[in-house]
Amino acid sequence: MDLKNLDQLRRKLDEIDGQIIALIAERQFNVEQIGNVKLDTNSPTRDYQREKQVIDKVRHHATEHGLDPEIAQQIFELVIETSLSKQEIQKVKKSTYGSNKSALIIGGNGKMGQWFAHFLRSQDFDVFINDLAPLSDQQNFVADIGAIELNHDYIIIATPIQKSAEIIQQLCQLKPQGIVLDISSIKSPLRLPLRQLADTGCQVVSIHPMFGPDIQLLSGKHVIFIDLGNEEAVNQVKQLFQPTMAERIDMKFEDHDRLIAYVLGLSHVLNIAFMTVLSESGEAAELLARLSSTTFDAQLGIASNVVNENPKLYYEIQKLNHYSPTTLNALSDAVQRIMQLIHQDNQGAFINIMTQAKNYMNQRS
């Protein structure tokens, strides 16, 4: 095959790529129309049975055309996720729950603060931002919360955990009219300030969004709600997430940090330790990437995301959780036991550990 034929084939490939993009755009337009019908008929955004039908048809068509059905499924799972995200955004905007309402976000120029600002604006909230300094051309910036009337419907505290405790204590003196919403990842340091704020007569709700600021689609994501004695305020905060597909979970204050020690604390430490071993190994990252396995690639992807997060926040999650020593000691003990089993050539016990872990995972519904 000469270079002329190669150029022709590449031009043909470019033409096909353009057709694929045009078809995806047409599909997205149709998705938007379906989203409008779902809104008009009050139908749920996500229909798992319909998704299965789509994937089954995609795999069938792929097989008919000699294409690997696994590849086709991966492509369409991404297309479906994008479609769901589009419909979820439609539903959030359509809710107009924030019409004639206002929200003040303390720490609003941080990553989660910006996420909440965008989320609330999409529901027609009038959003005000308080932070150390305004962003360029930022409107509705509040330099000093003590210098204004705190008559907002919601006041969201999106600052580092220890700073949040200080702000809550300050709010005890300012006595805001609306619902004060804490979104911290660790709750123990806030127990007393939150209780003191509630005792002043303020409406107080503590939540924990179990996702980061880069998330777009809330399907499969969770938001934890902790009732601090005002059920009506909790229900109003839940209403903020009603248009989304996020699962809203009720939890007792005393249970939160114990469970989060495993869900966040343990998973964070595992990935930080993994990357620490690699970075101190003396082996070139590029070389290890070329030699990678499926498991290594998956672990590296997760660990890379973790070490690129805010290290001060991740330190707070370990340091301020009273249950962290329990999980850290358990992790250290597990590693020592595995090392000992290998040193003792105890294959049976090693297999038992993996079997126990497998059985534990099989308990999940």
Image (spheres, rainbow, N blue to C red):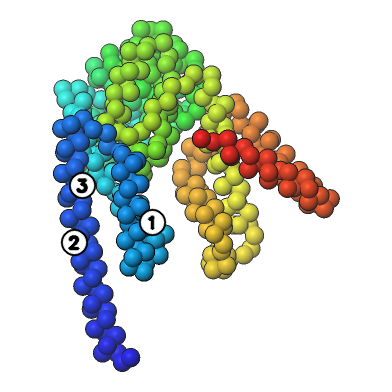
Q: Which mark is residue 22?
A: 2
Residue occupying image coordinates x 57% and y 62%: 293
State the image quarter where residue 285 is shown.
bottom right
Q: Are marks 1 and 2 in contact (CB under 8 Å)?
A: no
Q: Nearer the viewer, residue 43 or 210?
A: 43
In this view of the protein, can residue 37 be seen by the observer? yes
Name the quarter where the N terminus is drawn: bottom left
Q: Which mark is residue 74?
A: 1
Name the residue type under label 1: Gln
Could you tell which of marks 3 and 2 lies nearer the N-terminus? 2
In this view, 269 is above or below 161: below
Taking the image as shown, residue 232 lies to the left or right of residue 263, namely left
Taking the image as shown, residue 266 lies to the left or right of residue 179, namely right
Outermost residue on the bottom side: it is 2
Q: CA distance from mark 3 to mark 2?
A: 14 Å
Taking the image as shown, residue 169 lies to the left or right of residue 154, namely right
Badge 1: few (under 14), some or many (20 or more) residues near its Cα, within 10 Å? few
- The local secondary structure at tag 3 comes to helix
In this view, 182 is above or below 350: above
Q: Are marks 3 and 2 in contact (CB under 8 Å)?
A: no
Taking the image as shown, residue 196 lies to the left or right of residue 11, namely right
In this view, 210 is above or below 340: above
The spot of residue 102 in percent (x, y) is 22, 24
Q: Nearer the viewer, residue 125 or 189?
A: 125
Badge 2: few (under 14), some or many (20 or more) residues near its Cα, within 10 Å? few
- The local secondary structure at tag 2 comes to helix
Kindly identify which residue carries mark 3: 31
State the image quarter where residue 321 is shown.
top right
Name the residue type under label 2: Ala
Could you tell which of marks 3 and 1 lies nearer the N-terminus? 3
The spot of residue 196 in percent (x, y) is 44, 11
